[in-house]
Image (spheres, grey):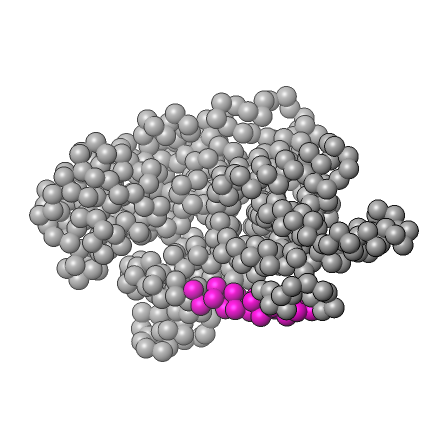
Amino acid sequence: MFSYCTDPSLLEGSAWLSCYLTSGTHLLFYGSFGTVLLLLAITAPVALLFGFGGAMASRSRIWPVRMFGKLYTSMVRGIPDILFFLFVPIALDQGFEWMRAKALCATDAPIRQGNDFVVCAAAKLPLSSSPPWVHDTYGIFLAVIAFSVVFGAFAANVLYGAMRAVPRAQLETAEAYGMSPRQVTRRVLIPQMWTYALPGLSNLWMILIKATPLLFLLGVEDIVYWARELGGSKTSAFSYPHPDWRLYYFLGILVFYLLMTFVSERVLGRVARRLSRGQAMMGAGGIA
Amino acid sequence: MKPLIIAATALALTAGLAQAETIRMGTEGAYAPYNFIDDATGEVTGFEIELGNELCARAELDCTWVRNDWDSIIPNLVSSNYDTIMAGMNINEERKAVIQFTQPYTPAMPSAYAALAADVDVEGGIIAAQTSTIQASHIAETGATLLEYPTPDQTVAAVRNGEADAVFADRDFLAPIVEESGGELVWVDGFDKVTLGEGIGMGLRQSDNELKDTFDAVITEMKEDGSLNELIIKWFGDDALTFE
């Protein structure tokens, strides 16, 4: 990065360190913090949306919709995350490619050939010729879906419980004013359920922060991957040889995760106080 | 739905551009000097990267490199996430059941045991090796206790911190580590050159015969004009095994 970094073997002390910490691999490492934050920023709202859908479906009066909601929340919560992460993205990817193959491939060659899953070049997703960032974005896109489905199921259960926790008297009063069921849900139930949902949701958020190393299963290089890769001992085949420094890298990541937790707690505490304003419930101020 | 719509639009826009065929080459990027990440630039480099680029240039193919974890390197090949594997992968029967290989581009490279002392009992002790390598299957046959790690670097770290008595890996991977350890790591007496496997080859899908023939042809060409041997000597030193 700096002009004096062309031959690191001649450098010593702080000059060496400044070059080391700005090497190509370190820049990728710093970038991966952005990847993790981006993933959290997209996944949290999407998962909440999935959860909301699941909770509303579980409360539906229509039997098939209700069954779907219940099945989604209970099934996904029962499957180990790691299995889910190995299965869903691969299944999604092959599903997309299979559909594209049916639409775009001119040949009749079978897609499954023994062990191989082969589609024609035009049906590849992303195309082999696309630049690397397209492949990376596609990987993150699959990751967001997988994370959202899993965490959506947990969020659905939290929201379902929160909806049931809203005092019945509130809803009855709304009905007595002549509101339709839909109006009761929109104007009374949903605004009031958040106070009850927040402790459970904040738990989920904390777990989501710590679940991001699962990203590596999907080929997205996250901070834990880079810490392991950079910290490992390097021989003189590398520009910056050094012994096993994994401990320092993992300590760095520890600080990052603790900081994330600290900031989240502060923000969630504030949100809880805000939401419970004017609500007559026990210990509303003390949540989170 | 929104991400789906965006993705669909992106696909529609890029779908017309797919004429020139690009070969995606999978590698691990953690096995110096075969393949590793150049820490100055963040790109992959090493013997296999240089060889792969040369093979592609001779075969007039457009190639890009993809890094993938060792554990899932074969599954991702068969599901067509990339088209070849060049990751220090030895040709053996077990792997041939799932994928096919080109002819080997290295001779059968020796493996070796390295430990903190030269008199370690490698047939009865605890030996570290990387998961699903020919070294790991060899240890399982010797009667030693096998400790498997996902990355090669962790196998060496396991010996240094006493979790394992010795590490078993390709000699060329261990050699610079042993040399630069300042006497901490040594070769195990009598076990510093163990020949396993049939040499390292490029892995391809079993249905991809055309690509296999292309690469086989250029590997033969490089063997015949001596450029492959030059490359082996450049990366593994003058004592390295070469093709005759």
Q: Pinpoint residue B17: horizontal percent, then vertical percent.
A: 67, 42
Q: Residue at x 54, y 58 (%)?
A: A206
Name the one closer to the observer, B47 or B207: B207
Residue A271 in which image quadrant: bottom right
Residue B181 in which image quadrant: bottom left
Q: Residue at x 24, y 45 (%)?
A: B128
User: Would you place residue A93 above or below residue A268 in this image?
Assistant: above
The span picked out in magenta is A254-274
User: Would you place residue A232 above or below residue A96 in this image?
Assistant: below
In this view, the residue farthest toward the bottom is A14
Residue B124 in which image quadrant: top left
On screen, residue B198 versus residue A258, left or right, reads left
User: Would you place residue A24 above or below residue A216 in this image?
Assistant: below
On screen, residue B144 versus residue B147, left or right, reads left
Q: Pinpoint residue B21: horizontal percent, then vertical percent.
A: 58, 38
Q: Inspect this view and state whether residue A48 appears.
A: yes
Secondary structure mostly taken by the magenta-highlighted segment of the chain: helix
Q: Pinpoint residue A21: horizontal percent, then vertical percent.
A: 42, 70
Q: Say how many tags the image has.
A: 0
Name the one closer to the observer, B146 or B32: B146
Q: Inspect this view and state whether residue B217 appears.
A: no
In this view, the residue farthest toward the right is A178
User: Would you place residue B98 above or below residue A184 in this image?
Assistant: above
